[in-house]
Amino acid sequence: MADETQRPSKKQKISHKDVDTLPGEVRNEIWRQMLLISKTSKEEKAQPVVIWQLHLDDPQVCNIQEVDAGNAHRSKITPSKSTPLDQQELIKAATKSFAEFLSEVSPETIFAFANTEALQKFAALINPHLQASVDYKIKLRLLLPLFDESEETFDSMTGWKSIKQAHGYAEEARSHVQEWMDVVQTIECPCEVFLEFGQHWRDYRALRGVTRSLREKDGWTLEVLAKDSAWNGIPDADLHKSLTVASVKGVELQIQRDMGQAQAADLVGHGCRGLRPFEQYVKASKTVSTG
């Protein structure tokens, strides 16, 4: 006797025109299966998101604390693989239901970009859906890899060397970060942006300036991921981590006001900038001693 429950031999396809008419729970499951990352891949499992925050309540210490920002799946995006999104015709048509889904999945997913080209393609893909998402609360979580270790251009920024110019000047560090800041702000919804430093950058004046527009963007937040390796091989690494976070956040540390002349001169001599009034004090001191 034939099994009346036997499945049909051919899979039934859902037209992308019909997706928006499906029940909400069905739509969400479709998007979840298309977008969420496979649990079997070790690198794509939900991972803790740890950021650095400053101890601003105690002016006598200059250190940072690690803060757990929850767990999230990392979706790696390259120019040739702009997530599963651009590979599905459903995405291009079912704008309303995708916006609905994105509002639910965005808190548990961090989109990590290989380079600015990948970010640019992602923005072009996602923006049409964001324009139709006024009824949904969406805040994307994005990871930007600054001075990635795979880029040989920035190898010379490692270590603690005496230099006359600002640290990162020869490597065009400012232009590198500026490009990331410009492209990420083309995304048309508020974002939580995580900066992941592959190498440290001691030009704190430039870092503070180049992140200002994003820092002041309404509804956006800017964080520094905890990653100790970028500061290996430099003395008083906690000081430089703190100065990095302070620059990104646009705040001044008490230790900058209390720093002595000798320490300030040493920092400036190793390419540090943005230590006012210490840079002015060091220059004035040199003028007096040589005058």
Image (spheres, helix red, strand yellow):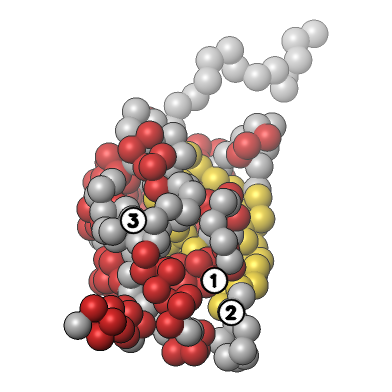
- Earlier-in-chain disc, 3 versus 2: 2
| Vertical position of residue 208 compared to residue 96: above or below | below
| Residue identified by numbered label 3 | 163
Q: Residue at x 37, y 78 (%)?
A: 275
Q: Do the CB atoms of the residues marked 2 and 1 lie less than 8 Å apart?
A: yes
Tell me the tag on residue 62: 2
**Which residue type does callout 1 highlight?**
Leu
| Vertical position of residue 43 compared to residue 11: above or below | below
| Vertical position of residue 189 compared to residue 35: above or below | below
Q: CA distance from mark 3 to mark 2?
A: 25 Å
**Which residue type does callout 2 highlight?**
Cys
Q: Position of residue 267 (x, y in %)?
A: 42, 69
- Earlier-in-chain disc, 2 versus 1: 2
Q: Residue at x 60, y 55 (%)?
A: 228
Q: Position of residue 251 (x, y in %)?
A: 41, 83
Tell me the tag on residue 239: 1
Front position among marks 3 and 2: 3
Q: Secondary structure at mark 3?
A: loop
Q: Secondary structure at mark 1?
A: helix
Q: Would you call the spot at circle 2 few (<14 residues within 10 Å), some (14-19), or many (20 or more)?
A: some
Q: Quadrant of residue 208?
A: bottom left
How many numbered discs sit on the rendered protein? 3
| Vertical position of residue 86 compared to residue 198: above or below | above
Q: CA distance from mark 2 to mark 1?
A: 6 Å
Q: Residue at x 76, y 15 (%)?
A: 3
Q: Would you call the spot at circle 3 few (<14 residues within 10 Å), some (14-19), or many (20 or more)?
A: few
Q: Secondary structure at mark 2?
A: loop
**Which residue type does callout 3 highlight?**
Ile
Q: Do the CB atoms of the residues marked 3 and 2 lie less than 8 Å apart?
A: no
Is residue 157 rendered to the left or right of residue 117? Answer: right
